Amino acid sequence: MSGRLLPLGSEAAWTGGVVSDWSTCLLAPNPSAWTLEGTNTWLVAAPGSTDVVVVDPGPDSAAHLERVVSTVGERGAIAQILLTHGHADHSAGALALSRMTGAPVRALDPEHVHGGEGLQSGEVIEFGDLVIDVISTPGHSADSLSFRVNGDAAILTGDTVLGRGTTVIAWPEGKLGEYLATLETLAETISAHAIVHIYPGHGPLVMDPSTRIEKYIAHRAERLDEVRAALHAGAVTADEVVAIVYAQTPESLLGAARLSVQAQMDYLSD
């Protein structure tokens, strides 16, 4: 679940591909208003290494998973399968990919772990020169993680930061307070480690990570002000707030808007 709440705009369509010596994106065939051009499946490996880490295998699509296996097979084998979170557009293909390759599936939520250990915040995953730091980034969902690829000066963010637009706070498991704290965590990480790219779960690369996080924080503050104003004007339910605050949002995204509004209302009631 991505839940983009801003229009696509005029940006060129994202198609994935090789983005650095360390990282390749294979775009899953599941485009929608919620997932942009589709889910980004990331293949990460140190240059010259045969150990490849797959992040977010995407939907349970035989053609997509076969493409992942074939692409990895050109250089080595899948060492681990990591999930940024358990929403089906990121995780549904993980078990099938594990059975195809023997690679363990690792995630924060035990429900999605298969053949290996779960992931923990602060954990460091190493395969030779490839070092991945696991960062807890809840808010979009309770189990959301991000992965910092040290050699690539990049962070893989799943749905926490998108390549285009803003993400939904997937209430009730998604919490706005946690998401706001996560944005601060990402801002600090980007600054401390000189991160130059965000590799999102949907959409193109984020080339200006610090600016994007600043815009996300400002956007959330603006939306909270709009929700407060709608409530003060007499709106009571989430649907009533959506009708006021998201009046220009395409109908296909009103479900995402409703979830985010409910998360905002819960945040304001605490």
Image (tube, grey):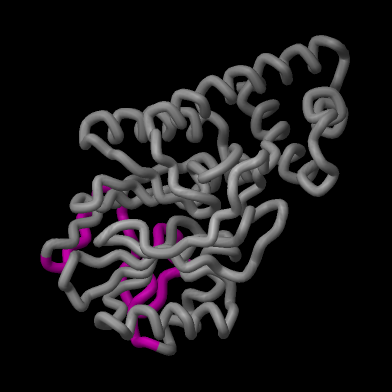
In the displayed structure image, the side of residue 171 where residue 18 appears, left or right: left
Give percent across and percent down for residue 107. Answer: 40, 62
Can I make out residue 252 in this image? yes
In the displayed structure image, the side of residue 151 where residue 264 appears, left or right: right
Is 180 part of what is drawn in magenta?
no
Q: Quadrant of residue 31?
A: bottom right
* Residue at position x 31%, y 73% in the image: 80
Q: Quadrant of the N terminus?
A: bottom right
* Residue at position x 62%, y 58% in the image: 37
Along the line of sight, which residue is nearer the eye, 176 or 4? Answer: 4
Give percent across and percent down for residue 269. Answer: 66, 21
In the displayed structure image, the side of residue 23 where residue 250 appears, left or right: right
Q: Residue furthest left?
A: 128
- Which secondary structure dominates the residues rendered in magenta? loop
* Residue at position x 71%, y 34% in the image: 262
* Residue at position x 63%, y 53% in the image: 36
Q: Quadrant of the C terminus?
A: top right
Is 116 part of what is drawn in magenta?
yes
Can I make out residue 171 in this image? no
Along the line of sight, which residue is nearer the eye, 60 or 264? Answer: 60
Number of on-image labels: 0
117 lies above or below 179:
below
Along the line of sight, which residue is nearer the eye, 77 or 270? Answer: 77
71 lies above or below 5:
below
Q: Residue furthest bottom?
A: 100
216 lies above or below 47:
above
Span highlighted in magenta in the image: 101-128
